Amino acid sequence: MQTGLLHLHGFLPFIFLLLMLVVLVQNFLVWKSDKAFTRSLARQNRIAVVLTHLQVTIGLIILFVYRRQLILDMGNLTSNKAIRETYLEHPVIMIIAAVLITIGSAKSKRGTTDAEKAKSVVVWFGSALVLIAYAMPWEKFLTRAGA
Ligand code: HEM
């Protein structure tokens, strides 16, 4: 179970990051042109939100179930750079990013015009993606990809 969740949390970002980029470009085009905010685009936005929540849920399980000892050792958690980055900064920043994505999705649903709906996604998902790019453990992630 633990290994499965760790693998899933490490692999899911491949799909998630790709989808985020696709969704951002598509919403940007709707925002800046006369293109329609289609049901298919709304569905893709929703899938991005679901993947975000899935990633957060798995992350929380890993953190509080399998790495509990690490986060209970406050001294080590704050003084050891590698531990702090992975088990404190990464989770906190990713949760903030997930909140931004959730807000963006809610605002998009409440938008009255197609451009307004798309703009909310671009602004909120885009800001979240900057945070995600910052807090991503790129070395581990790219090692998985064999880069
Ligand atoms: C969009 C959100 C997130 C992304 C894209 C993401 C991505 C990743 C990646 C790529 C790794 C490296 C996995 C590996 O070793 O191959 C990782 C590790 C980790 N993530 Fe996340 N993460 C996200 C959110 C979270 C959240 C919200 C938490 C906790 C609340 C969390 C907790 C962890 C932990 C504890 C590890 C280290 C696992 C270990 O001990 O090996 N992550 N994350």
Image (cartoon, grey):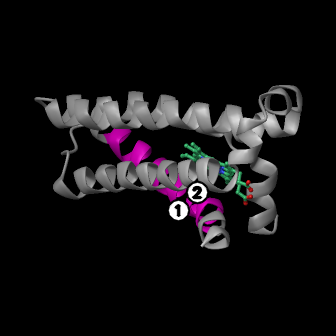
Q: Residue furthest left?
A: 112
Residue at mark 1: 15
Estimate the x, y position of residue 134 in percent, counting from the top left. 68, 34
Tell me the CA gap for discs 1 and 2.
5 Å
Res 32 visible: no
- Name the spot of residue 111 as percent of width and height, x first: 16, 30
How many labels were placed on the picture? Answer: 2
Q: Position of residue 106 (x, y in %)?
A: 24, 34
Magenta region: 8-29
Is 21 part of what is drawn in magenta?
Answer: yes
Res 117 quadrant in image: top left
Q: Relative to residue 88, is residue 41 drawn left or right?
A: left
Q: Read off the residue under disc 2.
A: 13
Asked if residue 40 is among those painted magenta in the image, a careful observer would answer no
Please give the name of the residue rendered at 17% of the width and 55% of the height, measured from the top-left corner.
39
Q: Are marks 1 and 2 in contact (CB under 8 Å)?
A: yes
Side of 21 where 82 appears, left or right: right
Of the 4 image quadrants, the one containing the N terminus is bottom right
